Image: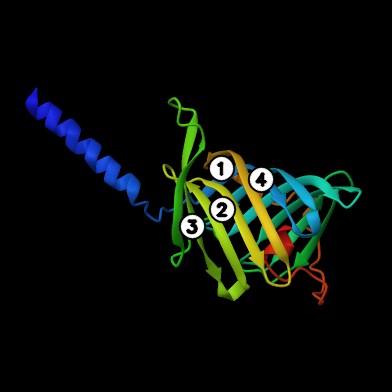
Amino acid sequence: MRAFLLLTLSLSVLLSVQAQKPHRCKAPPYLEGKLLVVSPEGKTAVFERFSYDAVEQRIRVIASGKEGTQDVFVDFLMLFREGFYYDINYHNKTCVKVPFSGDFIPIEIPINAQHTAQFVIGSLSAPAQGLLVNNWVGSLPELKANYSLSFTEFGCIPVSAYYNVENTGHVLSSYFDVVVGLENPDVFIPPSFCTSAKLLEKNKDEMADFFTALL
């Protein structure tokens, strides 16, 4: 009994020490879920569903929202290695390939990120009423952006991401209903009517980075 109590006490102390020193975790390479993005100038887009593949650097977003007073619905298959995305319209059976030069930004904690706080979203009053998360801040010089990221302590699941991007503004993303893995990997295969889509010529008005492509 004494040995059991000592072991229990030791584990409790170890867990307490680890909780006080959050580590830079690695997020899962495959994710699906929903995403709320608040973009500059107060525009808001609700991404009904996103699929994320960090290995092949692919993102699929099916989004609905408003741009000013106009309702917007988009279906984008973003292929960062290829340098273009498909703008898919199932209603009209049309598909456009649009070039962009955005770097793929993985859903992860950058190596130069600084831990600022550990907190609970929800309540500490009873078990299962709160979510333990860690907040990290830093900058991405290549994108001229500062960031504040929140990930769960267990599982390293993204909760929120705030970016202040030069020449773009503030971009706030909130994740919810996130699932680890891909239920249907075929989501990254463009529909058959995209086979004949031609790549548009790139011009100065085309999407130039990750954030403008996503927005």
Residue under circle 3? 136
User: What quarter of the picture does the N terminus occupy?
Assistant: top left
Among numbered discs 4 and 1, the one appearing first in the sequence: 4
Callout 4, which amino acid? Answer: Leu
Q: Residues within 10 Å of mark 2 (few under 14, many from 20)?
A: many
Callout 3, which amino acid? Answer: Trp
User: What quarter of the picture does the C terminus occupy?
Assistant: bottom right
Residue under circle 4? 35
- Please report contact status of discs 2 and 3: CB closer than 8 Å, yes or no: no
Q: Which is in the foreground here, disc 4 or disc 1? A: 4
Q: Mark 2 and mark 3: span between their CA atoms? A: 22 Å
Residue 202 position (above or below residue 35)? below
Residue under circle 2? 53
Q: Mark 4 and mark 2: span between their CA atoms? A: 15 Å
Left or right: 28 with respect to 65?
left
Among numbered discs 4 and 2, the one appearing first in the sequence: 4
Residue 105 in the image, given as x and y percentages of width and height: 58, 62
Question: Circle 1 — which element?
Answer: loop
Looking at the image, the residue that sits furthest to the bottom is: 204
Number of numbered tags placed on the structure image? 4
Residue under circle 1? 182
